[in-house]
Image (tube, rainbow, N blue to C red):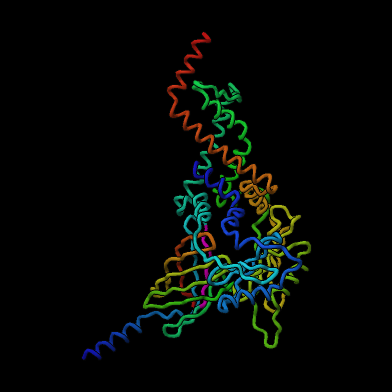
Amino acid sequence: MAILAGTGSIIEFEPELDRAFHARLSYIQPQAASLSLTEIGNAVSRTFGGEPVVAYFLSPKPDLSWQVALPSGIAYVNQYTGEVLGERRRGETFLGFVRDLHMRLGGGEFGSGVLKWSAVAMLFSLVSGLYLWWPNKQIRVRLMPGNRRRWSDLHNAIGIVSLLPLGLLAISGVILGFQGQLAPVVYRLTESRPAVVSRFSASVHQTGGVTITPDQAVARARRLVPNAVPYRVQMPKYGGVYQVALSDANGGVAGDRNVVSLDSYGGVVSVMKSSTLARGDRVFMVNEAIHTGNIWGVPTRIGAFLATIAALMQLSSGLAMWMYRERILASSAVSLEAIR
Amino acid sequence: MKKIIGIVVLLASTAVAADLSGKWSGTFRAAGADHDVPQLFILKQAGSRLSGSGGPDESEQYPIENPRVDDDKVAFEITTGEWKFSYHLKVSGPHLTGDLELTSADSRRTAKVALNKVN
């Protein structure tokens, strides 16, 4: 539970921390207009000895650089000038390790099993904590010197104040941990089926056919999913088709689940829109958004972060109560004597 | 005499080396994951040179990169965007089995791969 809470508090702001750790690659001065994807791809390819572009990642904010995936790594580029800011090779970083700890205890099946049952244990401890708190309803913390019950006061106060957010984190964590087992039940209850993107075919070479550029692929995708903004473009050499992923600000938690697949000649292979996602898929997306705090943006992310800190404080105060249990019990006995 | 033995050994090793050309279908499961991921490779071997593509199915294929064939061992990579997949496999008749390392800009995961020759 301590690992879940500690790592959870760090990965709550993973994108921001990652950018802070790579500030020189991430932040740029916004300008009037971006270069085309073709120009950016050519600039990156030239810098890296003619390496082909695997995919483009377009940033959501004007002051953040775009990224270009290459076989050798991820290149960061200023989309207004074409300046290549540098490259990150693939490999585990500190934040990746922390996320792996949070999801799999840094290991495989055993680690993920331990963690999902820890989420169940966390839920159980919240329920049992509420049961123990209920008779006295202690909220006030008596921090005066010599008070042997300050740890239990602290545990009571933080526990009841953070019960709701911690409960949401624990329940959503249990659902995430057991998603595979719960999926059939959720889809049956919502009378839906998992969304399947039917890909009819990959690009088939057409003699004399005119291939489209990534910019033309983006323009076509935007016509198919109006009001959405592209954030990822996969090149057809890598995957067989252009795949343009778009984010719709009005689409809620599923807003970034729009994907248009086009063959090299601009023919539409498939279109997946967030508005057509199955109810069961939405249930899991909402659950994940609750767990990560993304459901209502920054305010709920801060709330989720504070909840993980509260969980760490609960674990610390609970441990202190257990370590000083004899003194606390003696103090209770004295109080009872005084009452008599 | 030594030359003859050498040639015989060389011919024998060539004879037992499996031809990787063809379609290979199977799955991998990343450590800690609760589901298998389908895999389909379409490979072409000419001597020690290997080329082709791989991906989850026939319509989504990524070119294989840095292929290396050494007797019954074969290694190659595919890049799918954020992730690079590095395969280290061993041929045993119509089976290709081994390890897969998946790396992104911040993560590294491992998986076991099992493929069977389709044709």
> Of A207 and B106, which appears nearest the observer?
B106
> Of A94 and A108, which appears nearest the observer?
A94
Where are the magenta residues, as a range? B35-42
> Count the marks: how many?
0
Position of residue B47 measured from the top left corner of the image (x, y, whole percent): 42, 85
Would you say B108 lies left or right of A140 here?
A: left
Would you say B115 lies left or right of A231 here?
A: left
Position of residue A54 measured from the top left corner of the image (x, y, whole percent): 60, 72
Would you say A73 lies left or right of A188 here?
A: left
- Which residue is at 52% across, 49% downward? A102
Would you say B107 lies left or right of A286 here?
A: left
In reply to whether residue B54 is colored magenta, the answer given is no
Considering the whole magenta stretch, tell me its main secondary structure. strand
In the image, is residue A169 above or below residue A201?
above
In the image, is residue B63 above or below residue A287?
below
Position of residue A287 measured from the top left corner of the image (x, y, whole percent): 63, 48
Displayed quadrant of residue A226: bottom right
> Residue pushed farthest left?
B1
- Which residue is at 45% across, 18% downward? A330
> Of B92 and B62, which appears nearest the observer?
B62
> Of B15 and A47, which appears nearest the observer?
A47
- Which residue is at 44% across, 63% downward? B112
In the image, is residue A277 above or below residue A330?
below
- Which residue is at 54% across, 76% downward? B63
> Residue pushed farthest top?
A340
In the image, is residue A95 above or below residue A45?
above
Position of residue A95 measured from the top left corner of the image (x, y, whole percent): 53, 54
